[in-house]
Every structure is written in C-alpha cells, then in structure tokens.
C-alpha cells in the first residue's frame, strides 16, 4: 500500500502542506522556532549531544544562542536556519534545560535533556536505552552495519547515520525534485559488502552513499519508491518502481538491465525483491503475479495469485518462497513456481513473513493477527493484537514484519505504537510503548510500520511514526540463525539468502 493510500499518511501529508503554506505566508521579520530537541535522550555523560530545530518565517541568516543549561558558556550560531545541529558534551549526569534564543528578538524555546553516567547493563527486556528524534515521521526499517552504525531515513528529508550510543554520526539531505513529496525517506537502507549504503528516496532517486556519508552516485527516479533494494552476490542492485519496469544497477550506478512483463510494462511493485541462493530474483506485483527473474533479467516464471502482491518474499533453506497477497493468503511456492500450499486467512497480507530455525513461518495480516505456520502449511498458533480500550476490543493493524531473535523471541510492532515480544509458543513476553501513551487522539497516535533489527550487544532498534528511533534492551543477542529471520533477510537488509 502506498503512502498516500493510508489514511494516517494522508493526514500527515495534509499537515506538511498546511505547515508549508503557513511558513510561506509568515512574515520574514517574524521567524519561528519549532521542534527544538536534544539527541539522544537520555544522553550519556562524556559523549556529544546533538541539538536540532526548525526555523521558519525567514529566508535570511539569523543568529541564535544556545545555552546548554549546565553552566558552560553559551554557544553562538551565526546561521540558525542552516546550522541546526551543534554539539555539546555534558560532563556530569543530571537533568538540564537547554535554551535556544534568537538574537535581537524576544523569542526562545527550551528542550529537556537527561544525562546519565552509563547505559543499563542489567536492565530487564523492554527497557529504553536511548531515543533519537528526527524532524518528521519515519517508517524506515534501520540497517545495521558491522561496526554498529545505524542507518535509517525520515520524512524530514534526511538519511541518518547514528553511532551505537545514539549520537549523530552524519545526516544527508534529500529532495532535489520540485514535487512536495520529493525527498521523503521511507524505505529501509541496504548495506553492500563494501559498505555502500543504498537508499531509495521518494520522487528523488536511488542514493548510493559511502560509509562517511558522502554521495557515491544517485540514479534519478521520479517515482514513489517506498521499499528497499536487494543486493546480489556480485553487488548488482535490484529495485522495483511505479515506472513500469524492474531495474538492475551495477555497483557504479550504471543501469544493467530493465525488465518488462510479457503483457505490458512491468506493473507497480511495492514489495522489496528477494534473491535466492542461486541468484533468482523474486518480486511481487500489483498485476497479481509473483515473478521469478534470472540474474540476467529474463523471465524464469510467474505465478498468479488472487489479488495484488505488495509483500516481499521470504526464502527457506530448501528454496521454498513464502509470500503473502492482498487476497488474504500466504503462498508457498517451489523454486520452479509450483504451488506447495497456501494458507488462507481472509485478510490481506501486506508485509513479509519470516522463518524460524525449526522452519516455522511467522507472518501477520492487516487485522492484527500474528500467525505461526508449520512448514507444511498448517497453523501452529495465532495471536490477536487488540485495542482493549474499546468494547468489544478492536483489532490493531500490523504494518511491519516480525523479527526473530536468537533466543526464539518474536518481535513485532503495531499501529498502536507498541512493540510486542512473543515467546515461541505464542504467549506474550513483554511490551514496549513508543510515542505518547495513551495518545490524545487518532491523529496523535504513534504507529510502528518498520521492522526491528537486533544488534549483537542485545540492543533492538526500531523507528516509529513519532519520528524517533528507539534503542531498546532485549535478551536476544542478534537474529535467529535461520534462513530468513527478519524482513529482507538480515540486519544489513540485503534481501539475499545465504
């Protein structure tokens, strides 16, 4: 489902349009500071804290002052509109109030800063370690590099790189197109073996960034591109689009080939492609087909489902392809395209399944139901995620994919802004609430549309629609050792089976 097809997203886009109009209408002599914040929260004593804000209502360079609130000298910023990421290091743990003011104007705002002397070491599962706030909503599933760097994107038109302690490493602005939606970074980044980070950006293009944040190349793509690329063993980058083709790029950014379906131009693809161990690329399409393409871009086979296929595949050790459809079924296909079985629920599957070490397939439909399915297609168990504030309870919408930890725990987010952790038998282990709980209204409700990633040190990273990325302590110390333990295979989001 595209961004504009979701009611919550339509509200946000309307909000962007409205706030943009207000900004243009504001008098240049009356600037306004909004969204002043300190990152990460809480901060770690002795490490840099980054401040960020938005200045609107003027196109001129306006100086401002920043008082960290710990008795150290005030920081002067010569251009408050374009230098909105100064740093400060708090030496002593405590609670501080940072103040940002405009020079020559009676205008200031404050931000709360909590500073701790160490990260929790014996914390219980589900404890917040830190939170980093961006300037807008995000559904970008993070990518985790081997050195611990966390990459993700935001609708504030930036690609972010954070250090494992939650401090900013760098951020890259996007949005070179003229369209209002240009530059929204909603897809999950993917990391190649050489460290290159590939990020699809809405109506802007496919970005290839070096690990230091510099641009390696950009392939312009004036299209809604909301899902990740897949990276082949030889470094080829595979990406779908709304442009009527499925493309393969060489690592240097040149186009290797484009695939067009036998009927017409390749239809809209919203799911990320998946690559089998033999190099076959699998991708679902809105023409109701699941396509299997050879590495050279020729058609191997295609299988017709009962409705659009916007999910991404999961690939088992024996090559079985699991993928859901809007027709409410999860399909299991042999590598030659023959149907093994389909598991019918009657509600659409929009997000990818994952596979546990024992072969159990975990998947969720859009009616708040998490399923555990045996490899033969029979149901193992199901668990409904419901809003108990209503009578009778109303099922939540699950828009992300389950992640399986190496302790067997299944982690998945929901549109109620809650991260759920389940035991392998389907019983609830614990929950973590993001955003404002409880929400004031449906407009302020935080939704989770991304998939968690798990670092070897027991930290789970998750983005949410409140624009924040959360670092949460868990007992798992990495992903399950299985064929497909999370969306797009692993923490680097390569979408390739190994």
Image: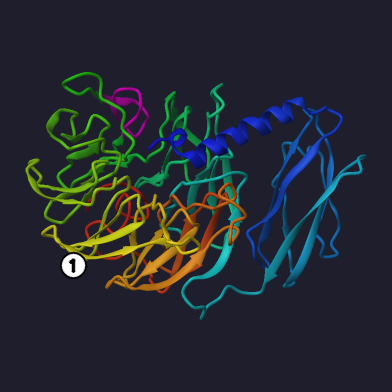
Does residue 100 sit above or below 260 in this rendering? below
**Residue at the disc numbered 1:** 358
**Horizontal side, residue 146 vs residue 118: left or right:** left
Q: Can residue 185 be seen in this view?
A: no
Position in image of residue 315 (x %, y %): 20, 51
Q: Position of residue 164 (x, y in %)?
A: 52, 61
Residue 47 found in image quarter: bottom right
Residue 235 in sight here: yes
* Residue farthest front in this picture: 391
Which residues lie in the magenta part?
239-257
Residue 186 placement, left or right of 92 = left
Q: In this view, does 38 lie to the left or right of 8?
A: right
Q: In this view, does 496 lie above or below 354?
A: above
Q: Is residue 245 magenta?
A: yes
Name the foreground residue: 32 vs 217: 32
Place of residue 467 in the rendered image (x, y in percent of width and height, measured from the top left)? 57, 49
Which quadrant is the N terminus positioned in? top left
Q: Which residue is drawn at 56% across and 76% down?
A: 120
Above or below, 168 relative to 284: below
- Residue 481 image point, x, y percent: 26, 65
Check disc 1 and report its element: helix, strand or loop. loop
How packed mark 1 is, by other alpha carbons closer than 10 Å (few <14, some 14-19, many 20 or more), is few
Compare residues 332 and 406 and report the one nearer the observer. Answer: 332
Q: Which residue is drawn at 82% across and 39% down?
A: 78
Who's the residue at 19% across and 37% down the image? 306
């Amino acid at each position: 489902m595209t961004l504009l097809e979701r009611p919550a997203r339509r509200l946000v886009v309307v909000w962007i349009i409205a706030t943009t109009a207000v900004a243009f209408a504001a008098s240049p002599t009356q600037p306004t500071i909004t969204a002043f914040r300190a990152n990460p929260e809480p901060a770690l004593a002795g490490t840099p804290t980054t401040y960020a804000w938005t200045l609107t209502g003027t196109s001129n360079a306006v100086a401002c002052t920043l008082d960290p609130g710990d008795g150290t000298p005030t920081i002067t910023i010569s251009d408050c509109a374009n230098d909105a990421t100064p740093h400060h290091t708090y030496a002593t743990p405590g609670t501080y109030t940072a103040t940002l003011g405009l020079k020559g104007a009676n205008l200031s705002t404050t931000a709360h800063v909590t500073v701790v002397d160490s990260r929790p070491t014996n914390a219980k599962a589900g404890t917040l370690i830190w939170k980093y706030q961006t300037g807008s909503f995000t559904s970008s599933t993070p990518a985790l590099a081997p050195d611990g760097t966390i990459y993700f994107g935001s609708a504030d038109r930036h690609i972010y790189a954070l250090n494992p302690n939650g401090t900013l490493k760098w951020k890259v602005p996007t949005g070179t197109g003229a369209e209002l939606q240009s530059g929204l970074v909603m897809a999950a980044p993917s990391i190649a073996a050489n460290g290159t980070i590939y990020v699809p950006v809405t109506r802007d293009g496919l970005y290839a960034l070096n690990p230091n944040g510099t641009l390696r190349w950009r392939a312009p793509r004036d299209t809604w591109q909301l899902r990740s690329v897949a990276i082949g063993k030889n470094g080829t980058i595979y990406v779908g689009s709304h442009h009527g083709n499925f493309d393969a790029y060489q690592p240097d950014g040149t186009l290797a080939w484009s695939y067009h379906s036998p009927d017409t131009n390749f239809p809209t693809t919203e799911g990320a492609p998946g690559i089998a161990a033999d190099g076959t690329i699998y991708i679902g399409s809105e023409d109701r087909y699941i396509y299997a393409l050879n590495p050279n871009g020729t058609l191997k086979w295609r299988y017709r489902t009962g409705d659009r296929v916007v999910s991404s595949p999961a690939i088992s050790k024996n090559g079985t392809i699991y993928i859901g459809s809007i027709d409410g079924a999860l399909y299991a296909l042999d590598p030659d395209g023959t149907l093994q079985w389909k598991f019918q629920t009657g509600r659409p599957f929009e997000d990818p399944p994952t596979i546990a070490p024992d072969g159990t397939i975990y998947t969720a439909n859009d009616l708040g139901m998490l399923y555990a399915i045996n490899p033969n297609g029979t149901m193992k168990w199901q668990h409904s995620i419901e809003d108990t504030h209503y009578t009778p309870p109303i099922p939540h919408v699950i828009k992300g994919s389950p992640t399986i930890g190496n302790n067997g725990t299944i982690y998945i987010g929901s549109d109620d802004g809650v991260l759920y952790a389940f035991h392998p038998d389907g019983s609830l282990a614990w929950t973590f609430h993001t955003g404002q709980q409880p929400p004031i209204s449906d407009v302020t409700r935080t939704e989770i549309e991304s998939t968690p990633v798990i670092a070897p040190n027991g930290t789970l990273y998750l983005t949410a629609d409140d624009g924040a990325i959360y670092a949460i302590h868990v007992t798992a110390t990495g992903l399950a050792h299985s064929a497909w333990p999370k969306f797009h295979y692993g923490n680097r989001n390569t979408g390739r089976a190994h």
